[in-house]
Amino acid sequence: MIGQGVLRECLADPEVRQVLAIGRSATGVHDPKLGEIVRSDLFDYADIEGELSGYDACFFCLGVSAAGLNEEQYTKITYDLTLAAAQTLAKLNPNMTFIYVSGAGTDSTEKGRTMWARVKGRTENELLKLPFASAYMFRPAFIQPMHGIKSRTTLYRVLYATFGPLFPMLNALFPKYVTTTEQVGLAMLAVAKQGHPAPVVENEAIRTLDR
């Protein structure tokens, strides 16, 4: 869902010359600036390294809900998959800005009781050690999908269908914890272009970076 949002904003931005989307399925978007690589294996990029160099930024939006997964399963998708891509890109593009979509409540100490938060924290910490020119960890909270964007996770679609009509009220009452796919996409572009004072970008900061 977040990937769809940032892709939309990238394609709409006249300063963005080229976008390469990599995933297990096609985006369904057609644009002269957009190239796509569809592949089943997102843990090994050795065969396509030649197509991954020369980029200024990576917006890493792949993720999965921890619901129904044990720590080993969640770590494989959240930590192992992310680091496989990031390590490849750091080698090929040392001047790249890497932006990782994490989540509000992530545990940077890696010692808390909440499994998903520990794994996300470990992932963030390892990403910040890689030799990128800069790396930022985005921690959005409740994200309202806009412009017809829908989550591919059934649980999230149910939640958004339930709470979506309440978005104006949630936004008014809890602005620190609410954002939209458009705001997240624009904020990621802004940070890729201009940087940010802190490597961890919380939801409240995301809301101020969308312009």
Image (cartoon, grey):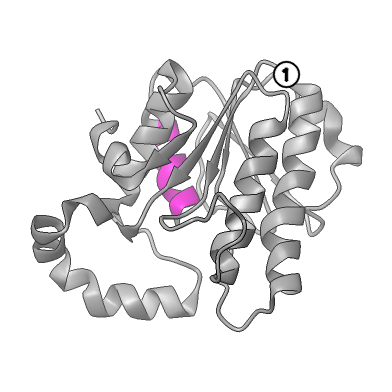
Q: Is residue 1 left or right of residue 163?
A: right
Q: What residue is at 91 percent from the left and 40 percent from the top?
A: 47
Return the residue at label 1.
94
Q: Position of residue 142 (x, y in %)?
A: 32, 61
In this picture, which residue range is highlighted in magenta? 2-11
Q: Residue placed farthest to the right in the image?
A: 47
Q: Quadrant of residue 51?
A: top right
Secondary structure mostly taken by the magenta-highlighted segment of the chain:
helix
Residue sitting at x 41%, y 55% = 104
Q: Quadrant of residue 77?
A: bottom right
Residue drawn at x 37%, y 31% as measured from the top left:
12
Mark 1 closeness class: few <14, some 14–19, many ≥20 residues within 10 Å? some
Dot 1 falls on a residue whose secondary structure is: loop
Relative depth, front residue between 112 and 72? 112
**Residue 55: image x %, image y %?**
65, 22
Does residue 158 appear in the picture of this structure?
yes
92 falls in the magenta region = no
x and y, in percent, of residue 44 in the image: 86, 48
- In front: 203, or 117? 117
Q: Is residue 113 left or right of residue 88?
A: left
